[in-house]
Amino acid sequence: MRLGTCSFTAHGWVGSFYPKGLPTKEHLGIYAGEFDTVELDVTFYRIPTQRMIESWYERTPESFVFAAKAPRAITHEKLLLDCEGETEAFLSAMQGLGAKLGPILFQFPYFNRSTFKSLDEFLLRLEPFLKSLPRGLRYAVEVRNKWWIDVKLTELLGTYGVALAVIDQAWMHSPKKIFESVDPVTADFTYLRWLGDRHGIEEITKTWDKTILDRDSELRDWADLCQPIRTRGVTIYGYVNNHFAGHSPATIRRLLDLMEPSVRRENAKPRTVVEPPTLFEM
């Protein structure tokens, strides 16, 4: 089980996660001293340069894993059409991480009926794209139309060994409901994302230096949901956004606290960062 944050930088992390005065170039190394994976958000906006790839590799231990969001040019702008060049360039660049490359996430936006009239229409677009992807890499697909999380989608993903990204987000069905309606495991790994309510929490804060929402109830549900996945021998990649509760490093620590001792031992590392902020309820 690998747990990390959505990006390793955020406004407010200096002083709450990273020691004050630490050079920015040393942040990733400090991050990797506590967590063994991270989801790269920067790749959503542009294909990383060779130097960026080399820097990420050099600043992390051999066991570290990077997940990466596919560029929005593929998933949002071209909607999987005529994007062979972008896809090839992106995957080629990411393979520079070697064994440190984890899952590639194709995160799709919410689609209204003017884009795709139905899930069936979307799947007709998705299947040839999945079929064209080079083998040997791990892929995950995230959809944000809650009624599309059904057997048709999971069966297609399972055909190509692609993981369904299960997200905890304000307008989606609850994870418990998703797990009750479909088998969310469609590959030899699964991909979980704790995203929260971006608009709601940004009415309270835009400085991500402390936990401001008590999400223990949801995290207890997640701890229960993760256990049967692990007993199936399926690797879990999970990533927390600051919008979930206010400070994603603290959310991960709390989730680990709620899991059985064996999970805590698997993820335990000497902490080299400042102490987390105190949880308080709004």
Image (cartoon, grey):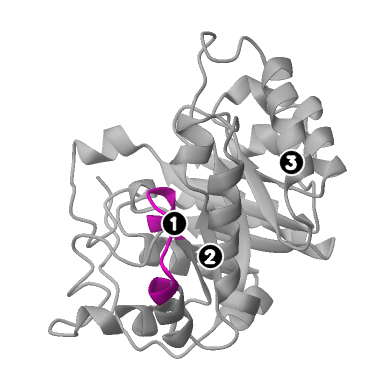
The answer for how far apart the CA atoms under marks 1 and 3 are is 20 Å
Q: Is residue 100 left or right of residue 119?
A: left
Viewer-nearest of labels 1 and 3?
1
- Residue 122 appears anywhere in the view: yes
Residue identified by numbered label 3: 130
Residue 23 figure quarter? bottom left
Q: Is residue 269 above or below residue 148?
A: below
Q: Is residue 74 above or below residue 50?
A: above
Residue 168: where, in percent of width, then height?
52, 41
Residue identified by numbered label 2: 93
Q: Amino acid at mark 1?
A: Ile
Q: Is residue 122 left or right of residue 158?
A: left
- Residue at horizontal 74%, vertical 17%? 120
Residue identified by numbered label 1: 47
- Residue at horizontal 27%, vertical 81%? 25
Q: Is residue 27 magenta?
A: no
Label 3: how many residues lie within 10 Å, few (<14), some (14-19) or many (20+)?
some
Residue 119: where, in percent of width, then height?
69, 19
The answer for how far apart the CA atoms under marks 2 and 1 are is 7 Å
Residue 127 figure quarter? top right
- Marks 2 and 1: CB-CB under 8 Å? yes
Q: Amino acid at mark 2?
A: Ala
Q: Amino acid at mark 3?
A: Leu
Does label 1 or label 3 sit earlier along the sequence? 1
